[in-house]
């Protein structure tokens, strides 16, 4: 039996990705820029075991159908030249499938653990390309700090990878996650973003401005210009949700507490705190805070009706073998 374990941290996009240029290879239609989170992570162990009849998976203590994970392991097995089944055991230290990027940390940890268990030594870039096959956002979770995912142009997807913009310790930003619902979301991102060409009249506009948004964000991060980073993050989030709302059928990921928390963030800003919100394909609100402001923001968000829990976190590290 060959076994390895890895930890990868979840990430939150500040400039969002939504839409695919190739569904089979999971190639994104636009690039994205994200922040990796210190306190939200997935630990995964993969054991290739020739006494198993088929792949098995245990996530958060429950045996699950390995379906999508088996498909991902097949890519690793093909690269390693093996057909041995595997057992996957994975734990998130946060709610799964509720807009907290569990697929990002999950597939990044799986890519690292599975390749190591299979005896493959891959570069961070190659691992990022592999993790992307599981979930677009997973390509970014191989890296700590602030990270850019490239859309790429090539049909084989070998230029669609993530790489760091700023290291974990280069800018001590803080993030408050306000959890408004612990249930799994109803429409996962793969289904939500499928066939957008045919399903949204806003998609062309989304694609047309993606490169400008990315380059503005890249510059603002390099200049450590928090107000611009924050304003661009809020804009990209609202633009993403505008696109989601315009998709037939319209996708409404927010609940009442999500909207209340967005207003609360803007009120905090009006009263002098440096904080901006972002929201993914789920009802949780993530507040991006300038260094030192996270505690005050967390205390305010905890008072918002419908906010169940808040978590204050900092920038996280690269994914690592345990
Ligand atoms: O790659 P996925 O399937 O986890 O989709 C990610 C979609 C968003 O979280 C909404 C945006 C993003 O770039 O992370």
Image: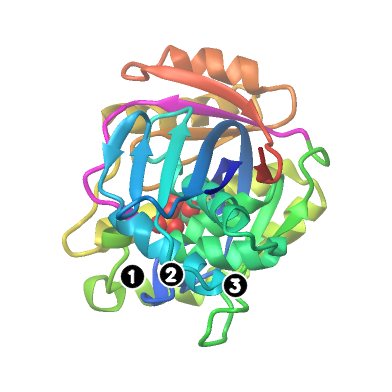
Q: Secondary structure at mark 3?
A: helix
The alpha-carbon separation of the residues under discs 1 and 2 comes to 6 Å
Q: Residue 22: percent from the left, percent from the top?
A: 40, 79
Q: Which residue is mark 1?
A: 202
The alpha-carbon separation of the residues under discs 2 and 3 comes to 10 Å
Quadrant placement of the C terminus: top right
Mark 1 close to ligand 1, CB under 8 Å: no
Q: Residue 180's quadrant in the figure?
A: top left
Q: Residue 206: which numbered mark, if any? A: 2
Magenta stretch, overall SS:
loop
The residue under the point 42% across, 17% down is 309
Q: Secondary structure at mark 2?
A: helix
- Identify which residue, 150 or 121, lies in the foreground: 121
Q: Residue 243: percent from the left, percent from the top?
A: 34, 61
Residue 142, relative to residue 202: is it above or below? above
Image: magenta residue range: 172-189
- Identify which residue, 85 or 69, lies in the foreground: 85
Q: Is residue 198 magenta?
A: no
The residue under the point 24% across, 53% down is 251
The residue under the point 23% across, 78% down is 198
Q: Residue 52: percent from the left, percent from the top?
A: 35, 51
Q: Secondary structure at mark 1?
A: loop
Q: Do the residues under discs 1 and 2 have CB atoms within 8 angstroms?
A: yes
Q: Do the residues under discs 3 and 1 have CB atoms within 8 angstroms?
A: no
Q: Residues within 10 Å of mark 1 (few under 14, many from 20)?
A: some
The furthest residue to the bottom = 155
């Amino acid at each position: 039996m060959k076994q390895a374990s890895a930890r990868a941290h979840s990430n939150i996009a500040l400039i969002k990705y939504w839409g695919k240029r190739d569904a089979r290879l999971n190639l994104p239609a636009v690039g994205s820029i994200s922040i990796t989170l210190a306190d939200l992570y997935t630990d995964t162990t993969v054991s290739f075991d020739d006494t198993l009849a088929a792949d098995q998976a245990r996530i958060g203590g429950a045996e699950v159908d390995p379906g999508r994970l088996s498909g991902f392991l097949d890519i690793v097995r093909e690269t390693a030249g093996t057909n041995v089944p595997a057992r996957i055991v994975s734990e998130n230290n946060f709610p799964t499938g509720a807009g907290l990027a569990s697929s990002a940390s999950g597939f990044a940890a799986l890519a690292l653990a599975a390749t190591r268990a299979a005896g493959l030594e891959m570069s961070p870039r190659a691992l990022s390309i592999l993790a992307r096959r599981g979930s677009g956002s997973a390509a970014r979770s191989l890296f700590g700090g602030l990270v850019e995912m490239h859309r790429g142009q090539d049909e084989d997807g070998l230029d669609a990878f993530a790489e760091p913009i700023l290291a974990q310790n280069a800018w001590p930003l803080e993030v408050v996650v306000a959890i408004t619902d612990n249930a799994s979301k109803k429409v996962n991102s793969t289904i939500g973003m499928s066939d957008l060409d045919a399903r949204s009249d806003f998609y062309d506009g989304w694609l047309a401005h993606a490169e400008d948004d990315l380059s503005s964000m890249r510059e603002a991060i390099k200049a450590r210009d928090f107000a611009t980073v924050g304003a661009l993050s809020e804009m990209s989030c609202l633009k993403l949700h505008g696109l989601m709302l315009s998709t037939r059928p319209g996708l409404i990921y927010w609940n009442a507490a999500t909207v209340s928390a967005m207003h609360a963030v803007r009120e905090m800003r009006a009263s002098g705190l440096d904080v901006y919100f972002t929201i993914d394909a789920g009802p949780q609100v993530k507040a991006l805070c300038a260094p030192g402001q996270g505690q005050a923001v967390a205390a305010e968000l905890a008072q918002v009706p419908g906010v169940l829990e808040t978590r204050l976190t900092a920038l996280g590290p690269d994914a690592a073998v345990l």
